[in-house]
Image (spheres, grey):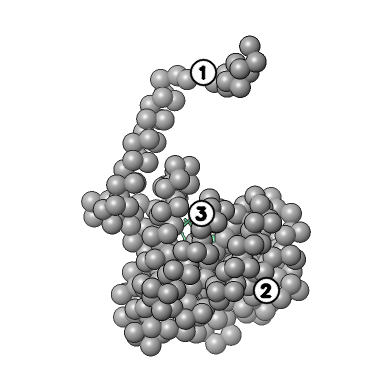
């Protein structure tokens, strides 16, 4: 009797079973994709709002199965997080970003950082500082070459171990951003105790910042909050000159979005620079 209490009383029907089988098949296919080298990184510039310089590039993963177009990350990252593949996939992304920074440096753009998205699962696996150290040695990366972007959930699941890991990263010269800031149901208490560098304001708040008073109110508050804590503010999803003007007037530090350019292969970016 006691042992049975732990068994969930979910009733599987045929449709649920089919969906589960589909997810398993996709998880296996993704594992194969990583072995076969079907993932690539695209890059989107992040610019200083004051002088327009490109200060960093955000690395965004793309999957191109059988070279038949790109599958967006929203369709496979969550499954990779569930299956654990996100750890080796995230390691691959960091290594690829390190390699690409080498290409930037060869082209005289070594001062530009590459920001890599790190999922909570990977961040909390606690191998990150070690992996980064190894990469920095292999690729002779200067301090500041790599940055990481974390969501609030990565931090909130375990603030103490998050802080330990962050301190180790900071010692290595790796800057840390909180991504999609303001979209989680977070307590903000963690902000004052953690060694952070940037807050990225989610694009849902940036959209209509120049025309909707509610979004403007939130952006003003986030910029003031971040600055009060000594952090720089990056606005995501900037799509118009009007939005950019608003952000400049209100002291936002950096911006990224289709207004400046969609993410693309590094070679395209270098050509257009
Ligand atoms: P994110 O980190 O919030 O990335 C920003 C997303 O906004 C990207 O979508 C980017 O292409 C899109 N974007 C950029 N500018 C604009 C704009 O002006 N307007 C609009 N509407 N969208 C814009 P993408 O590339 O589809 O990535 C989606 C999410 O997948 C990312 O959201 C991130 O959470 C995740 N992701 C991407 N690459 C990686 C990765 O290497 N590792 C992990 N763990 N997650 C990743
Ligand atoms: Ca991001
Ligand atoms: Ca984001
Ligand atoms: Ca996001």
Residue at image position (41%, 53%) is 88
Where is residue 164 shown, x and y percent of the image? 64, 62
Which label number is shown at residue 231? 2
Q: Is mark 2 within 8 Å of ligand 3?
A: no
Check the image and name the residue furthest to the top.
1
Nearer the N terminus, badge 3 or badge 1? 1
Under tag 1, what secondary structure?
Answer: loop
Residue at image position (65%, 50%) is 157
Q: Is mark 3 within 8 Å of ligand 1?
A: yes
Q: Which mark is in front, 3 or 1?
A: 3
- Residue placed under numbered mark 1 in the picture: 11
Nearer the N terminus, badge 2 or badge 3? 3
Residue at image position (57%, 53%) is 124
- Give the side of residue 255 with respect to residue 65, left or right: right
Under tag 3, what secondary structure?
Answer: helix
- Residue placed under numbered mark 3 in the picture: 122
- Give the side of residue 72 with respect to residue 209, left or right: left
The answer to whether residue 244 shows anywhere in this view is no
Under tag 2, what secondary structure?
Answer: loop
Residue at image position (53%, 64%) is 129
Between the residue at mark 1 and the residue at mark 2, the CA separation in whole angstroms equals 49 Å
Between the residue at mark 2 and the residue at mark 3, the CA separation in whole angstroms equals 24 Å
């Amino acid at each position: 009797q006691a042992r049975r209490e732990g068994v969930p009383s979910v009733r599987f029907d045929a449709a649920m079973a089919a969906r589960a089988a589909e997810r398993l098949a996709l998880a296996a296919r993704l594992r194969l994709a990583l072995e076969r080298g079907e993932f690539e990184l695209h890059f989107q510039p992040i610019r200083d709002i004051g002088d327009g310089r490109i200060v960093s590039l955000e690395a965004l993963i793309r999957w191109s199965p059988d070279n038949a177009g790109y599958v967006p990350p929203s369709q496979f990252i969550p499954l990779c997080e569930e299956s654990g593949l996100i750890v080796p996939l995230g390691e691959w992304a960091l290594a690829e970003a390190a390699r690409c920074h080498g290409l930037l440096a060869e082209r005289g753009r070594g001062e530009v950082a590459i920001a890599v998205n790190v999922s909570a699962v990977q961040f909390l696996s606690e191998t990150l500082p070690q992996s980064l150290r190894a990469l920095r040695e292999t690729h002779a990366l200067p301090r500041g070459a790599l940055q990481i972007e974390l969501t609030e959930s990565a931090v909130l699941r375990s603030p103490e171990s998050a802080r330990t890991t962050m301190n180790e990263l900071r010692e290595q010269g790796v800057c840390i951003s909180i991504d999609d800031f303001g979209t989680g149901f977070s307590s903000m208490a963690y902000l004052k105790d953690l060694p952070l560098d940037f807050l990225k304001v989610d694009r849902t708040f940036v959209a209509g910042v120049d025309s909707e008073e509610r979004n403007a109110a939130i952006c003003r508050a986030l910029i003031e909050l971040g600055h009060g804590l000594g952090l720089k503010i990056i606005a995501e999803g900037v799509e118009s000159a009007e939005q950019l003007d608003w952000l400049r007037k209100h002291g936002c530090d950096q911006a990224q979005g289709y207004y400046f350019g969609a993410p693309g292969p590094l070679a395209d970016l270098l050509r257009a620079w």
